[in-house]
């Protein structure tokens, strides 16, 4: 079996243990005589899978009882619209623009109401998180929106914005379950699972109960009303059954690894190995302001496009794949999600050292 070290930003590396378990259960899930792909989402056996997945996620994040957990479809991109549809009572909200995904959510919100840019780091190509301690938040704003970890640019909020009492909505797609998170600080936390949690096709949303109401924007489709999904325990229609089952396995894997505190330590160790090297290297440079560096996505450059291309190509041949930066920014990016083992990063740095020597 030739497995590579996969530094993809998403869909991304999953724990090998989980993949093996899923393979073992492929033809016959626990004596049911069926694959999870084949069973009814209304069956008792599937009900146990989805309920247990929710329970394990609640344990990991210590989600309080007054928050609902929803397993949804449509990707994080569809959720960009669901936020204003479900929350814009005054038709006004504040957005902090820290990269492409925040920008896209902002543009989507403008379709439904007045979306106001509260702060932005566009002036320096999104290489930092702006100061969010005293934003021009007005009383009539329904919520404040952030993208907490910026997958493309490699920045992460280390402190949450002061929302002056307004509901905080956060896209945590690329930092979901990478470290502990205090759910009570948010009204809505959501993310696509295809980075840290499972196969693409599921969005997990954790929403404070009082924000789930029938009072949504006129014309909101039934499927996109959180109330519909919540009233039906994410089973209003056929959910992405198999993908939720894999998410459930990843939750159990994280628990086995020691939970989110242990996951944070594991991720900090990995990130330190790579950032320390970037700080000492004469060829490779990190692009993000140090205090805003993400633990999950690490962009870097050599300053020379031809050298970047050579590096990406040689790395790929050596088994370090998907290191090309996002098509809009170029350079390189190593995504080092939960399932990336420490030796994957150690070996990558070893390879970078060798490349630097050979190409100095
Ligand atoms: C932070 C963030 N938000 C949103 C998205 C969009 O997710 P999706 O492709 O599930 O719509 C991505 C995708 O990479 C992302 O990284």
Image (cartoon, rainbow, N blue to C red):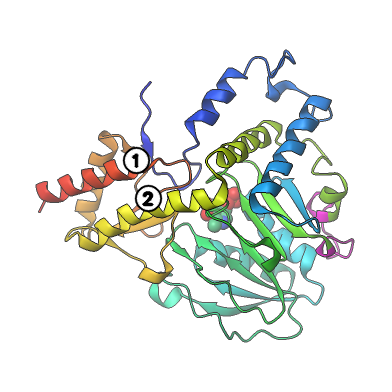
Q: On the image, numbered disc 2 is attached to which residue? A: 270
Secondary structure under the numbered disc 2 in the rendered image: helix
User: Residue at (70%, 60%) from the top-left corner?
Assistant: 81
Quadrant housing residue 45: top right
Where does residue 356 sit, x and y in percent of width and height?
A: 15, 51
Q: Please give left or right for residue 357 compared with residue 288 in the image.
A: left
Residue 18, given in percent of the width and then of the height, sits at 55, 30
Crowding near the residue tagged with mark 2, few <14, some 14–19, many ≥20 C-alpha atoms within 10 Å: many
Q: Quadrant of residue 101?
A: bottom right
Quarter of the image for the C terminus: give it: bottom left
Q: Nearer the viewer, residue 28 or 181?
A: 181
Query: Which secondary structure dominates the residues rendered in magenta?
Result: loop
The boundaries of the magenta stretch are 210-226
Q: Earlier in the sequence, mark 1 or mark 2?
A: 2
Q: Is residue 291 left or right of residue 28?
A: left
Magenta span contains residue 221? yes
Disc on res. 72: none
Task: Provide residue 313's location: percent of width, then percent of height.
Answer: 25, 41
Q: How many marks?
A: 2
Mark 1 vs ligand 1: CB below 8 Å:
no
**Separation (CA) of disc 1 from disc 2:** 9 Å
Image-based side of 11 in relation to 220, left or right: left
Q: Which residue does the numbered mark 1 point to in the structure image?
A: 344
In reply to whether residue 337 is colored magenta, the answer given is no
Q: Are marks 1 and 2 in contact (CB under 8 Å)?
A: yes
- In the picture shown, does residue 159 fall above or below 24? below
Quadrant of the rendered image containing residue 256: top right
């Amino acid at each position: 079996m030739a497995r590579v070290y996969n530094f993809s930003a998403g869909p991304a590396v999953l724990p090998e243990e989980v993949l093996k378990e899923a393979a073992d259960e492929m033809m016959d899930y626990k004596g049911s005589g069926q694959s999870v792909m084949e069973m009814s989402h209304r069956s008792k056996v599937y009900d146990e899978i989805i309920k247990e997945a929710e329970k394990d996620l609640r344990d990991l994040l210590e989600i309080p009882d007054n928050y609902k957990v929803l397993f949804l479809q449509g990707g994080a991109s569809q959720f960009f619209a669901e936020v204003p549809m479900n929350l814009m009572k005054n038709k006004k909200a504040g957005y902090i623009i820290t990269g492409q995904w925040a920008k896209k959510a902002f543009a989507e919100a403008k379709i439904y109401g007045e979306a106001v840019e509260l702060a932005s780091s566009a002036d320096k190509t999104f290489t930092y998180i702006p100061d969010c301690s005293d934003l021009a938040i007005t009383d009539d704003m329904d919520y404040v929106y952030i993208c907490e970890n910026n997958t493309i640019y490699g920045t992460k909020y280390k402190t949450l914005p002061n929302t002056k009492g307004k509901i905080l909505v956060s896209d945590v797609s690329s930092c979901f379950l990478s470290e502990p998170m205090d759910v009570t600080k948010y009204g809505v936390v959501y993310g696509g699972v295809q980075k840290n949690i499972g196969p693409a096709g599921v969005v997990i949303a954790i929403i404070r109960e009082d924000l789930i109401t029938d009072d949504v924007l006129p014309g909101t489709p039934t499927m996109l009303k959180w109330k519909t999904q919540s009233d039906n325990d994410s089973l209003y229609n056929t959910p992405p059954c198999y993908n939720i089952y894999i998410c459930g396995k990843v939750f159990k894997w994280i628990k086995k690894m020691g939970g989110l505190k242990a996951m944070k330590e594991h991720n900090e160790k990995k990130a330190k190995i790579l950032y320390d090297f970037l700080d000492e290297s004469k060829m490779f440079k990190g692009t993000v302001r140090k205090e805003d560096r993400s633990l999950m996505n690490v962009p870097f450059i050599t300053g020379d496009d031809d050298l970047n291309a050579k590096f990406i190509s040689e790395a790929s041949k050596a088994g370090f794949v998907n290191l090309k930066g996002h098509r809009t920014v170029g350079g390189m990016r190593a995504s080092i999600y939960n399932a990336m083992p420490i030796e994957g990063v150690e070996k990558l740095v070893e390879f970078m050292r060798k490349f630097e020597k050979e190409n100095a």
